[in-house]
Image (spheres, rainbow, N blue to C red):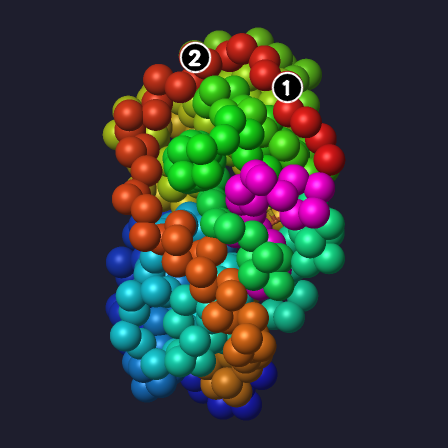
Amino acid sequence: MADDAALLAFTPQVEAETAPVWNLIKDQVTPLEWRLHAPLIADIRRLARMRGAVILAHNYMTPEIFHGVGDFVGDSLALAREAARTDAKVIVQAGVKFMAETSKVLSPDKRVLIPSLEAGCSLAASITAADVALIRQRYPNLPLVAYVNTNADVKAEVDICCTSANAVQVVEWAAREWGVDSVVLLPDEFLARNVARQTSVKIVAWAGRCEVHERFTVEDIAELREGYPQAEILAHPECPAEVVAACDFTGSTAAMNDYVKTRKPRQVILITECSMAANVAAEAPDTQFVRPCNLCPHMKKITLEGIRDALLFDRYEVTVDEALIARAALSVQLMIDLPPPAVPARYDLVKARHHVDVELI
Ligand code: 13P
Ligand code: SF4
């Protein structure tokens, strides 16, 4: 913790400096919370300027982080692209460890800091590099695609990475490049099942799960439909396939954000992590948000205090073995080099409700 208590006072100067953020998020945080957040936001901005740091904040960060200190905000794909092109000396990853590792792999000369060492991910924990080596032996002729929600050693073993924003695009690209009709997509079973519904490529999947999205059920969606018949329901593709099939749209966190801002539904329900709705709602005043949600315990390890201390004490540095970086960079860069996915054109895919089976390893 910083020992200079004066820095944390809600002074008139802090209040004035942070007023635009307050105006944006005043429906998402209480005035009492704001008196604690504002001095930290001012302090973090000062420290970031001093250190030549850029703060990359994921869509699941709390509103005071997302709107208060994120220099660049977005989904995993957008944050990875930004990490690859930033010329800042230091990257502070306001997100989970696999995102920080991706930044390090794409920008090995930068100092990458993560505010908490406990910010993991159940998907990244579900598969090891040794598992992937065995999968390679079992499917020697198929391309291996890994979701970015994996550790760097897993990324080093696969042919290309994907995110929820471009998974269909990457799978179809890999099938074409390899001249095959099946692709191995690791490690999220539900993402794999949801991708399978949107492509003719056959999918071989691993039984990894996101502990946040796997908890949503079709019964939840049926209850929401009954209670809020006018609402448009959007689900992240890490949700079970039958949940996604019962919703109106599926897409990455950025695609959901884009959907709300572009289509301006009167009422919307985001089937995903809790902070997502708060962050989108702050910038979508014409849409009413119904908020059933699940908290990601890993994302919630990132706090303003943690970000301030990361900049102040230069911690916690994320390192990846050099040899591993060279190998992991191939699969991540290959994904980055594909053209960005056409998000709005995918809105119609919501109607692709047929069930397609996947081969589970
Ligand atoms: P996005 O790539 O859609 O931002 O999702 C990342 C994530 O961890 C979702 O749980
Ligand atoms: Fe991992 Fe799920 Fe949390 Fe995203 S929401 S970081 S996939 S556990």
Indicate the position of residue 188 as horizontal and vertical percent values. 63, 39
Closer to the camera: disc 1 or disc 2?
Answer: 1
Instruction: State which region is magenta.
Output: 136-152
The residue beneath circle 2 is: 351
Contact flag, marks 1 and 2 (Cβ < 8 Å): no
Indicate the position of residue 150 as horizontal and vertical percent values. 60, 54
- Mark seen at residue 357: 1
* Rendered position, 100 above or below 179: below
Q: Residue furthest bottom?
A: 3
Identify the element where label 1 is drawn. Answer: loop
Residue 234 falls inside the magenta stretch: no
Which residue is drawn at the image coordinates 40% and 39% (left, top)? 177
* Rendered position, 9 above or below 356: below
Q: Amino acid at mark 2?
A: Lys
Which residue is drawn at the image coordinates 69% and 54% (left, top)? 133
Q: Can residue 180 be seen in this snapshot? A: yes
Which residue is drawn at the image coordinates 36% and 77% (left, top)? 53
Q: Can residue 12 be seen in this snapshot? A: no
Question: Total of numbered circles in the picture?
Answer: 2
Other residues around mark 2 within 10 Å, as few (<14) / some (14–19) / many (≥20): few
Toward the viewer: 27 or 203? 203
Whichever of callouts 1 and 2 sits on the residue coming sooner in the sequence is: 2
* Rendered position, 327 above or below 132: below
Residue 137 falls inside the magenta stretch: yes
Indicate the position of residue 98 as horizontal and vertical percent values. 56, 60
Other residues around mark 1 within 10 Å, as few (<14) / some (14–19) / many (≥20): some
Mark 1–mark 2 Cα distance, whole angstroms, equals 17 Å
